Image (cartoon, rainbow, N blue to C red):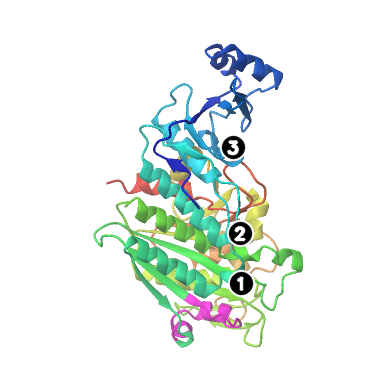
Amino acid sequence: MESVFITHAELAVPLIPVTPERLSGALAARPEHWRRWTEQHGFRARDGSLLRIPSAEGLTEAVLIGYDPDAPLWMLAQAAKELEPGSYRLGGEPLGAEMHLLAAIGWGLGSYRFERYRKVEKASPQLIWPEGIDRKRVEAVVAAHALVRDLINTPAADMMPSDLAQAAEDLAAQFGADSHVIRDAGEIAAGYPCIHAVGGASVCGPRVIELTWGDPGRPHVVLAGKGVCFDSGGLNLKPGNSMRLMKKDMGGAAIALGLARLIMALSLPIRITLLVGAVENAVGSRAFRPGDVLTARNGKTIEIDNTDAEGRLVLADLLVRAGEIEPDLLIDFATLTGAARVAVGTEIAAFFSTNPELEEALSGHAARWDDPVWPLPLHQAYRYMLDSDIADMVNSSTNGYAGAITAALFLKEFAPEEVPWLHFDVMAWNTRARPGRPKGGEAMALRTLLGFLESRFPD
């Protein structure tokens, strides 16, 4: 998609952000026909509302934009979607560098369009860069979101494990990172046996992806992502209505890739390792079965209660690998449980942590970026729900309670001890369209984690 930012234009329509409380004052300083036009159209500066003010020649002289001062990120997001092609600039009273930065990012997020299968004929409006903002930062945040959204929105036929691996290799090449993709079935079976079992029934074989970037002397952050490119449920087959959106079951891997891109684009002072297990959970003669016992990378045995609880098996091997490379911080992402959606809904990223300080640190960044996250308890007393009669544990509790917690407790068995760990259980999908957040794949918790990593690992 063409850039939605420009450096200069001879004629650019001013965008005037206003709140309901400041509308009358803003109009008092403008030509009288602005006030009359505003009253005629009943414009009240509600959040997300737009009003085009015509000139005497019948052209758009300015655009009034209603916004919520508590959510400045989305100030221009609806305008980026609705306005006609042309050049625009941020006008009105000076809002400060921080507000301008957020507004520019919102413009970029609001301009996103998924065009792989259907080209949009209408050109996007373009915004002149507001003065005094960090363009590199804006472009990095917008591009990372676009990457995540594109990956998730792509149907499984074009986003199988090989495609996800290619996306990681392309990202590594773009930023000079090292990448290694394990493709050989025997090598995956030997080193990542749970990943091999989950992906074994698909004609599209599994991939284990490892990307590394950064100075070895820097703090080491490991990002792990569940890359289930399509989840049929396996032999515990999902009903059709539950399978419809399962192209998004690689959303955790997409978010991990997006965060890695953001870290590299901004040259954060850390070293990262990205781990992705890319599989299709398919039905076939080689599918793993309820009642099977798998042996994970660390030797722990897992009795399969439900083949539709496959994402935690993929992450189990990755978390063991993460412990082997000695991280200072471990973050994993997965579209793991419906229980987390029941707990916090589809628009909040649920997370678990082994460190209470991490929970507190995330909240402030979530508020600043309007990127909500919410901690759920890693309640160790529920570990009994994962007990097995024949193995070290089962992969899924049968009692129907605390599904997100028991899934997190399962993962905790494989995460390295003494390493701060964050586990995100996310929807990775917008079920409704909002300014800057179109319906479809979404990079949940991405902005929050950017702020968190920058504060935790300053220069």
The residue labelled by disc 3 is 83
Establish if 459 lies above or below 258.
Answer: above
Q: Residue furthest left?
A: 217
What is the crowding at mark 2: few (fewer than 14 residues within 10 Å), some, or many (at least 20)?
A: many
Q: What residue is drawn where x is 35% and y is 56%?
A: 264
What element does badge 2 sit on?
helix
Closer to viewer: mark 3 or mark 1: 3
Say the numbered circle drawn on residue 64. none
Residue interval drawn in magenta: 187-207
Residue 376 seen anywhere in this rendered image of the structure: no
The answer to whether residue 38 is left or right of residue 2 is right
Which quadrant of the structure image shows residue 410? Answer: bottom right
Disc 3/disc 1 C-alpha distance (Å):
34 Å
Which quadrant of the structure image shows residue 303? Answer: bottom right
Q: What residue is drawn where x is 67% and y is 72%?
A: 232
Closer to viewer: mark 3 or mark 2: 3
Establish if 332 lies above or below 206.
Answer: above
Q: Is residue 159 magenta?
A: no
- The tag earlier along the polypeptide, 2 or 1, is 1
Instruction: Depth check: give the residue in front, 187 or 38.
Output: 38
- The tag earlier along the polypeptide, 3 or 1, is 3
Q: Position of residue 295 (x, y in %)?
A: 51, 81
Q: Give, as a three-letter code, the residue at label 2.
A: Ala
Q: Give, as a three-letter code, the residue at label 1.
A: Ala
Say the numbered circle drawn on residue 404. 2
What is the crowding at mark 1: few (fewer than 14 residues within 10 Å), some, or many (at least 20)?
A: few
The residue labelled by disc 1 is 157
What element does badge 1 sit on?
helix
